Amino acid sequence: ICAAKTHVFVDSGAFGEVDRSLNVVKPMSHPQWRQILALYLRLARVLRERLTIVAPDRVGDQVETLSRMSAYAEDIYECVSLSSRALVLIQKGAFSMTEFYHYALEVLGADDPLYVPAIPMKKDATSLAELEQFVQEAQPHEMHLLGIGPGNRKFADIKHICRGVPFTCDSNVLTAAVGRSRSGARPLTRASDR
């Protein structure tokens, strides 16, 4: 499938279920989840420790995220048992981020270091204060920051907050350079306009 040292990150697509206001606009069905989890497992069998997957969730919804994690815990465990890394999304809501993380691990039956807390930094974005509180309270062994990368203006502050906690992040450089925002056209769109 891939070169020997290539690491692969596979997201579930749940990010697209909700709009910017966190309204569910394209709900994911059980058959869709089964298809995604079957893909995770096929990849885990080949890539093993080179694969990172995202546990089932719903952006901005702690209850639905816990429900999905519970429903598909065995599938995620099967991937982790093959040494793949599973990101456990820490959604915000009635529980603190730390409480939610502990509930999620309980629901997943997880105590393995391959279950990594993943902090949303785009939709329902985590503030720097919330991130700092989570790092202090949960003391994670590692973290993943979703939807952000080194080019973000907050990245230096994030590195300071996460000092001592290894973290990975993801962002789509191409998507960040395309489109229009309140401040105008992004670089590739500006070039295309010219």
Image (cartoon, rainbow, N blue to C red):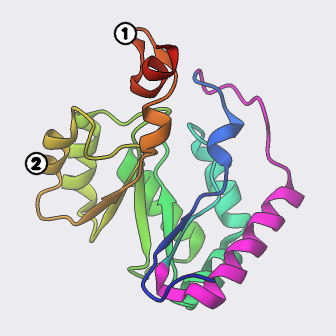
Q: Residues within 10 Å of mark 1 (few under 14, many from 20)?
A: few
Residue 37 x, y percent position in the rendering: 73, 70
Left or right: where 154 falls relative to 127 = left
Asked if residue 176 lies left or right of residue 13, the reply is: left
| Residue 134 disc label | none
Gap between marks 2 and 1 measured at Cα: 28 Å
- Residue at which label 1 appears: 183
Residue 97, given in percent of the width and then of the height, sits at: 39, 47
Q: Give the image location of residue 1, x and y in percent.
A: 63, 83
- Residue at 89% x, 60% y is 31
Which segment did they paint magenta? Answer: 21-50
Observer-nearest of 51 and 97 = 51
Disc 2 target residue: 160
Judge whether residue 76 can be spotted in this image. yes
- Residue 79 position (above or below residue 127): below
Determine which quarter of the picture holds residue 117. Answer: bottom left
How many neighbours does mark 2 have within 10 angstroms: few (below 14), some (14-19), or many (20 or more)? few
Q: Is residue 194 above or below residue 17?
A: above
Q: Give the dominant element type of the magenta stretch: helix, strand or loop.
A: helix
Magenta stretch encompasses residue 37:
yes
Task: Tell which of 193 and 168 is nearer to you.
Answer: 193
User: Which of marks 1 and 2 precedes in the sequence?
Assistant: 2
Identify the amino acid type marked 1: Ser
What amino acid type should be assigned to the residue bearing mark 2?
Answer: His
Q: Position of residue 98 (x, y in %)?
A: 36, 53
Closest to the camera, between mark 2 and mark 1, is 1
Asked if the residue under mark 1 is in contact with the one under mark 2, i.e. CB atoms within 8 Å, the reply is: no
Residue at the (56%, 85%) spot, across then down: 47
Q: Can residue 94 be spotted in the picture?
A: no
Q: Is residue 86 above or below residue 92?
A: below
Q: Is residue 24 magenta?
A: yes
